[in-house]
Amino acid sequence: MQRTQSTFNRIMDIFTHFLLLNMMWLVCCLPVITIFPATTALFAVVRQWHLKGIDSGVFQIYISKFRDNFRKSFVIGLLWLVGGAVLYFDASILLIYSFPGSSILFTITMFAAILYGITMPNLFFMLVNYELTILNVMKNALLLSISKILHALSYATIFVAGVAIVYYFPFFLLIIGSLLAFIMYYIFDKLIIQIKNQTTNEERPNDTIIGDSPPTK
């Protein structure tokens, strides 16, 4: 009986951590313009959980990471928004007007849009793991998405699965953001370990390969 009670208490403790993190993320996303900083802080917390365990906390870590990464993640978010707007504008024009080569340009634009979407999670991983400039955060995220496109697509699959789960089981809306971030970061962490093992003792050019700067604490 005590063992069952202990297991139940542990499950409830884990659920509470995911719930609190999800609620903090949603609240910080409410101004809309803070979505990128809020999501960066979300991934920073789950990174801490992977490193030190879920008992390392939520509130203090989230607030600290939200503040520390606000400027960089906000600027990257603006740049990313501009990039998305350009892709949307180009696709809209190509759908309305037909001219020689328009189908080829539309195909290229759609490919760029897909790459744009699947690169986004890697932006957050770069932000919370490495001390890089804004340019190098975006460059490394793009390079990682291209070189490990199956992993990038897996993030999109996880996201779609999360949306489907919430649609059929609305209760999961309470924890879905933090839960998906935790799962995605787990996949990313395994990938980085794999990359490090493959590149051990190999010379790597600066600012072009993941891990060229020390990880954040």
Image (tube, rainbow, N blue to C red):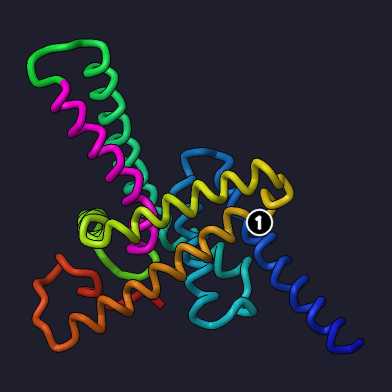
Q: Is residue 209 left or right of residue 184?
A: left
Q: Could you tell me residue 120's position as x and y percent? A: 36, 50
SS under mark 1: loop
Residue sticking out furthest to the right? 1
Viewer-side residue, 73 vs 5 = 5
| Above or below, comparing residue 134 to residue 183 in the picture | above
> Which quarter of the figure is the C terminus placed in?
bottom left
Q: Quadrant of residue 188?
A: bottom left
Quick one: label 1, few (<14), some, or many (20+) residues within 10 Å? some
Q: Residue 174's x, y, as percent?
A: 69, 52
Residue 138 x, y percent position in the rendering: 25, 54
- Asked if residue 105 is positioned above or below residue 141 in the image, the reply reads above
The residue singled out by tag 1 in the image is 175
Q: Say which quarter of the image contains residue 12.
A: bottom right
Q: Which residues are magenta?
A: 103-127
Q: Residue at x 27, y 31 (%)?
A: 87
Q: Does 202 sit left or right of 80 as displayed? A: left
- The amino acid pointed to by label 1 is Ile
Q: Quadrant of residue 61?
A: bottom right
